[in-house]
């Protein structure tokens, strides 16, 4: 039976005496050295951005493996499952922040999630920056670290402003699975569809339901997703269901039948057939295999 994967908060990392802060800015090596008790795999209830300036190793986000490279940056949203194995000489910057760091002062509850960096469907969670962009981001992170460590009046406002600059700069160069030449209207419709999937994938599996909420026909929605990403609307919904199934299998001691019920499958047998068809393994085998590799 899978052991429950721990979920870390900023309070866990800073300790109760500094629990009121909503952001951590630190050098990556200092963070790793001061948190050697972190268990792997784990997940966060906050957002995380990591910039590697040197070193090597590997890390994984939601079961996908990535190599650590200089000028490499990764982005993680709350709930994603994460592991890492960095070389001893790995250096860089790490910024952890809660969603409320921004939403406390703005009216948009999806402010952070509207950036493409943290979209699980159409964006990649990693990127290798060119020299110019990496230097700019590294310089901003260094300024944020100085501000975070020295404190002072309006500290959080300054950090919020600099982090916003980083989010915009990285969003402009973020790799995407979107095909080039897509109209602004089509992009907006696609983003709306992605948000609807995130909110409704447990209950709504058919493109028709999403098309109705978007006030388009199912054929139009399928044409849109195929044009932009090269996948049907049904495939995108299915991929999100599969990701959640994987997360539940490795992040809880729930029985497979309970996971099937949580994801609103008719019964355990149907869920098992669905999972095996698209992953090549039964839920039990996937859970056992993941346990053996962590």
Image (cartoon, rainbow, N blue to C red):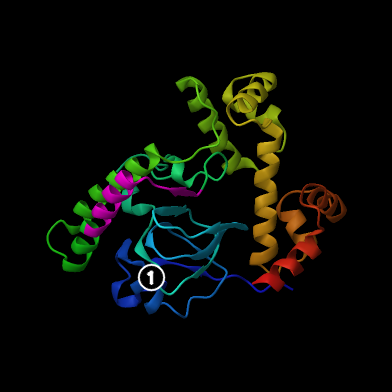
Residue at 20% across, 52% down: 157
Q: What residue would you read off at disc 1?
A: 11
In the displayed structure, does residue 111 sit left or right of residue 201?
Answer: left
Residue 104 visible: no
Q: Main secondary structure of the magenta part?
A: helix
Please report the bounds of the magenta region as a residue range. Answer: 125-142
In the displayed structure, does residue 161 sit left or right of residue 268?
Answer: left
The residue lying toward the viewer, choosing from 42 and 12, is 42
Residue at 40% across, 68% down: 90
Residue at 55% across, 57% down: 66
Is 109 magenta? The answer is no
Q: Give the vertical position of 263 relative to 219 (above or below).
A: below
Element marked by disc 1: helix
Quarter of the image where the C terminus is located: bottom right
Q: Position of residue 205 (x, y in %)?
A: 71, 38
Is 133 magenta? The answer is yes
């Amino acid at each position: 039976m899978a052991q429950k994967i721990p979920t870390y908060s900023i309070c866990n990392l800073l300790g109760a005496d500094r629990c009121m802060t909503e952001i951590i800015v630190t050098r990556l090596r200092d963070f790793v050295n001061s948190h050697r008790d972190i268990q792997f795999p784990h997940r966060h209830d906050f957002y995380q951005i990591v910039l590697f300036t040197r070193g090597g190793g590997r890390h994984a986000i939601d079961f996908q493996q990535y190599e650590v490279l200089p000028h490499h940056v990764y982005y993680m949203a709350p709930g994603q499952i994460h592991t890492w194995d960095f070389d001893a000489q790995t250096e860089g910057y790490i910024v952890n922040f809660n969603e409320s760091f921004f939403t406390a002062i703005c009216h948009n509850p999806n402010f952070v999630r509207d950036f493409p960096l943290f979209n699980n469907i159409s964006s990649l969670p990693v990127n290798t920056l060119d020299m110019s962009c990496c230097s700019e981001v590294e310089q901003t992170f260094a300024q944020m670290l100085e501000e975070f460590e020295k404190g002072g009046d309006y500290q959080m406002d300054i950090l919020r402003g600099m982090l916003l600059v980083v989010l915009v700069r990285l969003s402009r160069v973020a790799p995407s699975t979107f095909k080039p030449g897509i109209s602004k209207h089509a992009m907006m419709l696609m983003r709306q569809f992605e948000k609807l999937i995130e909110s409704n994938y447990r209950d709504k599996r058919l493109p028709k339901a999403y098309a109705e909420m978007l006030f388009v026909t199912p054929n139009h929605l399928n044409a849109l997703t195929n044009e932009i990403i090269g996948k049907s609307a049904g495939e995108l919904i299915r991929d999100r269901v599969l990701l959640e199934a994987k997360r539940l299998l490795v992040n809880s001691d729930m029985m497979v039948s309970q996971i099937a019920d949580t994801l609103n499958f008719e019964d355990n047998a149907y869920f098992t057939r669905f999972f095996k068809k698209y992953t090549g393994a039964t839920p039990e085998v996937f859970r056992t295999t993941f346990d053996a590799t962590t």
